[in-house]
Amino acid sequence: MEGKPKVSSKIIPLAAHKGAEKLCELCQRVARLQCTECRVTFYCDAEHQQADWVGIHRRICQLLVPIRTQRAGQIVAQRKKAELIEICRSVAQQKLSEGKHQEALPASQFCLRCSVDVHGPDTVQLVPAYLLLAEANIGLGNLIRVSELLSQAEWSVLKNPDCGHAVQHRLHRSLGRLHTATGNLEQALLHFANDIYFASEEFGLDSPITCRGYFLMADAFAKQGKTPVVRSLYSEVAQIWHCRLTNLLENRIQNDNQSDKAQQVEVDDMLRTMLEFEQEDFRKDPAQVARVAHCLAMMWFLAGDFRKVNHLMTFGIRGWFDTVTHFPISSLYRLNIGLCLIGEAVKIGGNYKIQWILVDFFCECSQRNIFF
Ligand SMILES: [Zn+2]
Ligand SMILES: [Zn+2]
């Protein structure tokens, strides 16, 4: 059927109502369509069906059957709902990390509905779902909704102060982001300070999660025009990631699971922001440019994207070049790692342009009397 969207094969008009009126999975309005795959999920229109399918339903369509047909007993149904919460949480988290905020909504919403079913309303177990929904809405700019969701989360946490450092860290991070978005920067900084405290208690001072807190805090300081603080926070972030990626590279740990892929997108975005900041600043620090570019190159090397590595290493080498004359020996060691990396990329990617850059580089080094 020409021009007909592929997805419509999965929905059929709802037959005459039997018993209670069916409601749309996404907006809770009266449903007119039914998912043909599971037959237990309903939609007001094809647009909502499509949004739900892309957002979460394709992952959980069949899992809903035993729960919604009440084929499973009460205990089994509760267990299956707990599994659904985990799936929705990870799908939403993945989409958020990739910046797909609209697509993250169905999974986050369903996560909240399931959490209410399993744990009851006003419980602290709902907080992760509130935070996912809030994060999706921050991305979409629905700040009033974010504020409502975070108030609910804050209230639950206040009533359960023993809810754990991880939950507190995520709550403060979301509040910090909300206040950054509304321009209330002093409040934002206060929340980021709490975020970093709880994250470091839970994950350690130089974990990538805590590190993200430094980055967000730097963003708030940047909006206040406090460039020196931004520089020092960015430098901290770059050092943590440089150290981490160097270790990963030396141990050759390949990133191929989903959460690492999501993290790559987030880290790529973060490092690029730092690279731009450094390049736009008139007091440009070539060592920082090199370190950040090197981080990006190592990350994409580990992910197997050699096209990106080539481009970034050219960048990184130029940065090292500018500082190499007054660099301590330990940095030359790092430079060596960078060069080995290019060597690998050349071997695998067969890129001759990079080989020429290397030749140039070694010529220049020998002229400057730099030996490795
Ligand atoms: Zn709807
Ligand atoms: Zn279905």
Image (cartoon, rainbow, N blue to C red):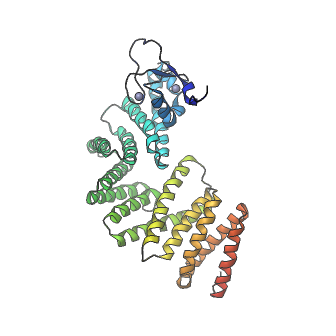
Q: How many marks overall? A: 0
Is the residue 298 above or below the residue 58 in the image? below
Is the residue 198 above or below the residue 109 in the image? below
The image quarter in which residue 351 lies: bottom right
Q: Residue at x 55, y 29 (%)?
A: 7
74 left or right, relative to 314 = left
Q: Position of residue 118 (x, y in %)?
A: 39, 30
Is the residue 202 above or below the residue 243 in the image? above
190 left or right, relative to 73 = left
220 left or right, relative to 234 = left
Q: Between residue 367 and residue 236, name the one nearer to us.
A: 367
Q: Position of residue 135 (x, y in %)?
A: 39, 46
The image quarter in which residue 134 lies: top left
Is the residue 280 above or below the residue 261 in the image? below
Q: Residue at x 32, y 56 (%)?
A: 180
Is the C terminus in the top left, top right, bottom left or bottom right quadrant?
Answer: bottom right
Is the N terminus in the top left, top right, bottom left or bottom right quadrant?
Answer: top right
Q: Between residue 226 and residue 254, name the one nearer to us.
A: 226
Q: Position of residue 74 (x, y in %)?
A: 44, 22
Furthest residue to the front?
Answer: 2
Q: Position of residue 221 (x, y in %)?
A: 33, 65
User: Is any part of residue 49 visible from this angle?
Assistant: yes
Q: Between residue 227 and residue 217, name the one nearer to us.
A: 227
User: Is any part of residue 83 visible from this angle?
Assistant: no
